Image: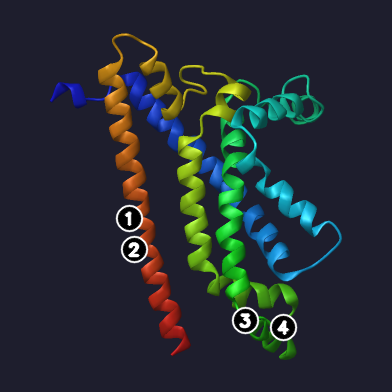
Amino acid sequence: MDFLSLQPAELQALTLTLRVAGAALLVALPLAVVVAYLLARFRFPGHGVLNALVHMPLVMPPVVTGYLLLLAFGRKGPIGAFLNDVFGISFAFNWTGAALAAGVMAFPLLVRPIRLSFEAVDTKLEEAAKSLGAHRVVAFLTVSLPLALPGILGGAILGFAKAMGEFGATITFVSNIPGETRTLALALYTATQSPSGDIAAFRLTLIAVVVAFAALIASELFARHLRRRLGDGDA
């Protein structure tokens, strides 16, 4: 069973993938909750434009998204140059750039289920909370957000899975640098390009399947727990 033993470079790719996906989710999830709530609860000028922009990464080729990120956040890009000069933050050819690409690609999959969850929450519950003196923000935090938790969890799992498997935008934006930007998907691609990489490709594929399956099972168990808790609270 030695062929199942991870090589140092493969373990490094797995660790980096979890780091990138975790960072992408940590940053993207709060923003996705806010955007999903705005789209679900309010109608304002530019509502359709915002909705289209959110879903653009789903319909554009990932390579296009990666190239746009390179133009904007590269070392010579307007945003990238500003962040590098003022805050010393660099995304180009860095694992943080891989996290940015993964977060952008995962963002639509975060927003969609969260928005549906907010739309399923009866607005009368929020209005009742506000009629009792609760501020809109308090009503959101104490009423809408807890009731939308199963959808938020579902979106988080989808987003995390997408971030783990992101390839096109990542390799276009930050290249395929061992130990820095070579995630599991890029390591698998690298293995398939080598005549002797079949065993490594099989190991990496197996790892990806196991991690994704474990995440889905864990999310289902947690979602059931949340639904039971919410059900008990209603009772």
What kind of element bears circle 4? loop
Disc 2 crowd, CA 10 A, few/some/many (<14, 14-19, 20+): few
From mark 3 to mark 1, how far is it between C-alphas? 29 Å
Residue plotted at (44% across, 37% down):
18
Res 144 → quadrant:
bottom right
- Residue of label 2: 221
From mark 2 to mark 3, how far is it between C-alphas? 25 Å
Residue plotted at (46% across, 36% down):
165
What kind of element bears circle 2? helix
Disc 4 crowd, CA 10 A, few/some/many (<14, 14-19, 20+): some
- Residue of label 3: 122
Residue plotted at (66% across, 32% down):
65
- The image position of residue 37, as x and y in percent, is 68, 65
- Residue of label 4: 134
- The image position of residue 33, as x and y in percent, is 63, 59
Decide: is 228 above or below 222: below
Q: Could you tell me if the residues under marks 1 and 2 are in contact, i.e. CB atoms within 8 Å?
A: yes
Q: Quadrant of the N terminus?
A: top left
Amino acid type of disc 2? Leu
**Mark toward the viewer: 2 or 3:** 3
